[in-house]
Amino acid sequence: MPIWPLILVALLAPFTAFGADDAYLAALVARSRELRLAERPEWRKLVHYEPDLIGSGLHGLLDNRGFYNSPEGKTRPQAELEATLASFFSDVEETPERQNPQCAFIARRAWLDEELRFDRGRLPLRACPRFREWHAALNAQRLTLVFASAYLNNPSSMYGHTLLRIDARDQDERTRLLAYAVNSAATTDETNGLTFAIQGLIGGYPGTFSILPYYLKVREYSDMENRDLWEYELELAPPELERVLLHLWELLPAYYQYYFFDENCSYHLLGLLQVARPELELTAPFRWWALPVDTVRAITAEPGLVARTVYRPANATIIGARLNNLSEEERSIAKNLSLGRAPSGEALRGRPAPRAAAVLETSYDYVNYRRATGKPDVADPARLARELLVTRSQMDVPSQAPVIDPGTRPDQGHRTSRAGLGIGKRDGRAFQELELRPTYHDVIDADAGYVRGAQIQFFDTAIRHYNDGATRLERFLPADILSLAPRDDFFQPRSWRVAGGWHRSFLKDGSEPLVASLERTTTSSTATASAPGGVWARSSTRRPAGACMPTPAASTTFSAKASSRARSACSNASPSAATARCA
């Protein structure tokens, strides 16, 4: 017998249990090397290996030590595969606190068994009762990717969020809320939005996977945060679905270092999904950043991966559609009924049953909306909601629920990165300008697929080159976030803006210094701070309603953007939306 298998067994001895079949382990390792299993996409996806940004090496994206069986497993796929094979010989018995490695890495076991065809007499397979109980409770039939639209009031959700829904065999559209959802998110109790944003940018939180009832996420997103949901039902064959579930079990105890822009919740959900098929390379396009809507776009771009799409409007969206179908008088009645200011019978007397039903349904939805968002303006909202529901049940007319046009799907909106070229003159000096915006959307972009009135831009940069040889930075805005929210007698959100960075300021003496600025704007006030050279000064500005701030008269820039679209956006902008781009 050659001596090298004995040396190999000696090296793997720390990872094997006493009494393991050393000769069979050596044979399995030799066979895995012959088949080059560690280089196969199945293995690299199961251990979440990604290429290093510099060099030809690899690194694993999971960060907890327990996810790797080898001390070198995070960077050496072959070492991790061999240590995993060795761990399968462990005689550890399963307890509520501990699993046998065969059960803890059950997806790896299934794939290695398929490739190496384990001899059950020399390597018996464990029963894994905890996994089997969990698997049976899910009763999974299909998977659905869910995208929740952007929510600017939470820094972790300003780009939207994705999660995975596990649809059971005994569920239909009426009981879909009872499904389980797979969520991936940063784990923290931090309530300060600025602190969370900073820590999220530098990887200050662990990201984890969890499973929870889907209705809890719908309540959070649709009822409390007014976020529309898009559900993308995936077309996976039973073996593909099973691979995802096996791997999910492996990921539940694991964690990764959460980064807001790249290694975030949506990115790691792609890492989970791509184990379904070896040919899927869902994470490959996202080396630098991974926006949730772009990850959805990557899913829909795969031929045959999405079976159908379902739109689930938020409560506020439904109420808004109901209000559009009411007259001004009916809106007033609905508002009074929802606040308990008038008895429903008296307020609706003499109205046709369909119109009365529409008013009651609107009032009922609005009571529940305010109840979900914690508004304390009704003493007993549950009792009031029941009274409205009882009155509505006495009317023998069908539901007056409006038909809501879902519009453009998020994955069908414009791309999130933008580059622009411009030419112009400044005081007679010709120049060319390059503009780069890595992410994501501004208010003069097409709204289709995005939240109307929401602007999120990061690292907006403009570099200008003059024909006389001068090249300089014209603008660098690390963050520019704007929320323009319409107000009416039912909804009174606040419009606001936060923006900061550096831009050229045109002073009376003819100089054009690079100025640092910080702006915080709300519906009631505007405060800005700026000064040349980064020295902060404070001033207060107020802009006339509907006015747009032009670019300096001496500078004319011709951009590749459609000028008519820019003029339209400028003419419709609110005071807090006016920027130098409305020229």
Image (tube, grey):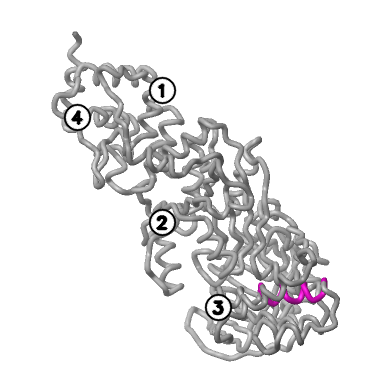
Instruction: Please say if the residues under marks 3 and 4 sit with CB atoms less than 8 Å apart.
Output: no
Question: In terms of sequence position, does the residue under pointer 3 or pointer 4 come before the other?
Answer: 4
Visible residue check, residue 173: yes
Q: Does residue 63 sit above or below 151 in this rendering? A: above
Q: What residue type is labelled 1?
A: Glu
As drawn, is 200 to the left or to the right of 166?
left
- Amino acid carrying mark 3 in the image: Val
Q: What element carries label 3?
A: strand
Q: Position of residue 494 (x, y in %)?
A: 61, 81
Residue at the image point whose x is 74% and y is 87% from the top: 545
386 and 165: which one is in front?
386
Cα distance between the residues tagged 2 and 3: 33 Å
CB atoms at circles 2 and 1 under 8 Å apart?
no
Q: In which quarter of the view is residue 16 placed?
A: top left
Magenta span covers which residues?
A: 354-365
Write down the residue under mark 1. 114
Q: Residue 515 carries which label?
A: 3
Residue type pointed to by label 2: Tyr
Q: Badge 4 is on which residue?
A: 16
Q: What element carries label 1?
A: helix
Look at mark 2 in the image and give the residue it sits on: 258
CA separation in Å, label 3 and label 1: 63 Å
Instruction: Left or right? Give the position of 296 relative to 76.
Output: right
**Quick check: is 363 in the magenta stretch?**
yes
> How far is the residue under mark 2 from the one under mark 4?
33 Å
User: Disc 2, disc 3: CB below 8 Å?
Assistant: no
Lower sequence index among marks 2 and 1: 1
Residue type at numbered disc 4: Thr
Q: Distance between the residues labelled 3 and 4?
A: 63 Å
Q: In which quarter of the image is the N terminus?
A: top left
Viewer-side residue, 192 vs 135: 135
